[in-house]
Image (tube, rainbow, N blue to C red):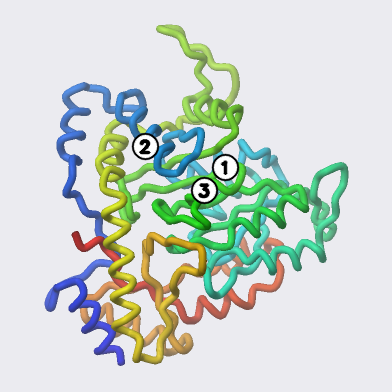
Amino acid sequence: MFDEIVGQIRKLHKKEQGFIPLHAPVFKGNEKKYVAETIDSTFVSSVGEFVVQFEKMMKEITGARHAIAIVNGTCALHLALLLAGVEKEEEVITQTLTFVATANAIAHANAHPHFVDVDKDTLGLSPSKLNEHLEKIAEIRNGKCYNKITGRRIAACVPMHTFGLPLRIDEVVEVCNRFFIPVVEDSTESIGSYYKGKHTGTFGKLGTFSFNGNKTITCGAGGAIITDDDAIGKKAKHLSTTAKIPHAWAFEHDEVAYNYRMPNLNAALACAQLEQLDAFVQDKRALANDYKKSFASLPITMVTEIADAKANYWLCCLLLKDRSEKDAFLAFSNEKQVMTRPAWQLMHRLPMYNKCFHGNLDNSEWLEERIVNIPSSVRI
């Protein structure tokens, strides 16, 4: 079976020999032109026309009222949590099946990650598990939600659209609204993904994106915050630019803030990439469909979008029989120069987060034993 999987991967990527990466960037548009224009302008730092253009494009793509260019996805999530009102020693609910940056951003806000399980079919935060968990441990006091076990306020919830697959985000938001918990969507992997006709990142109070080198759209390193809240949008831009009061020459700052603004050089690359987003997503969705058909006769499961979702399929995901089969396939495929990888180690198992509060995590633990990501690069 392993030979057949690897053979199909090579066939679909039209590469019978040599190394096939997990997800390589594709630069076939205006990338070099826009970067050269930026260098010629000398505006290569956080002030420049491409930063403005990037924010405009993000608003058009997502439908959000405000988009703020940020230096990377982790900083975007950190700042979004602060804008949502998270304070020191409070708790933020998120999923244990996620990249470490999600939990790190919570820790950077001096808060405590609080882990809830995912659904097996979306790999994202489970609204039913969240509701069941909160019914057991939550207590509402003066319009705020507290964990009656730890005594700490639950200040936010961060669901993550895993591998670009939209989760049941409307249901998560509905549960959180009943418990007075603001939602900050970790959409770092899901640019170009939609649920019920809305772009991911637009369901919660804020949404964040990443444009790291391995993402569907990349500018080397970059991120964004989106929101429909006018006050939050204004505050996000202010705090991301060291809280500098606008002035032609004076340097005045009115609070402790952050140097989180995306450089114009990165924004130039991002704009050229965003121009190709529709074509990239179309190609990735075609690849996912080809994989699904190719593996239909094999005793494996490919995770696909749920009803009402349109996924970008950032990374295509297979579920193998058990941990033993997963580990054997990872060794076999990588030895054959076809790059595959397992899921991240679950956050509640990491040494810095293994004492964090959590509910039942059976689905996450089941998935961790079986998930394999296979090559998912754009083939254009």
**Tag 3 secondary structure:** loop
Q: CA distance from mark 2 to mark 1?
A: 17 Å
Which residue is identified by label 1?
A: 206
Residue 133 position in % (x across, y down): 75, 66
Q: Residue at x 52, y 24 (%)?
A: 238
Q: Which residue is mark 3?
A: 201
Q: Position of residue 163 (x, y in %)?
A: 43, 63
Image coordinates of residue 176 in percent, x first then y, are 71, 53
Residue 143 visible here:
yes
What is the quadrant of the N terminus in the image?
A: bottom left
Q: Quadrant of residue 264?
A: top left
- Out of 296 and 240, give the one closest to the viewer: 296
The answer to whether the residue labelled 1 contacts the one labelled 3, judged by CB atoms less than 8 Å apart, is: no
The mark lying in front, picked from 2 and 1, is: 2
Farthest residue in the top direction? 249
Residue situated in front as seen by the camera: 30 or 210:
30
Identify the mark at residue 57; answer none if there is no mark. 2
Image quadrant holding the C terminus, namely bottom left
The residue located at (41%, 48%) in the rendering is 210
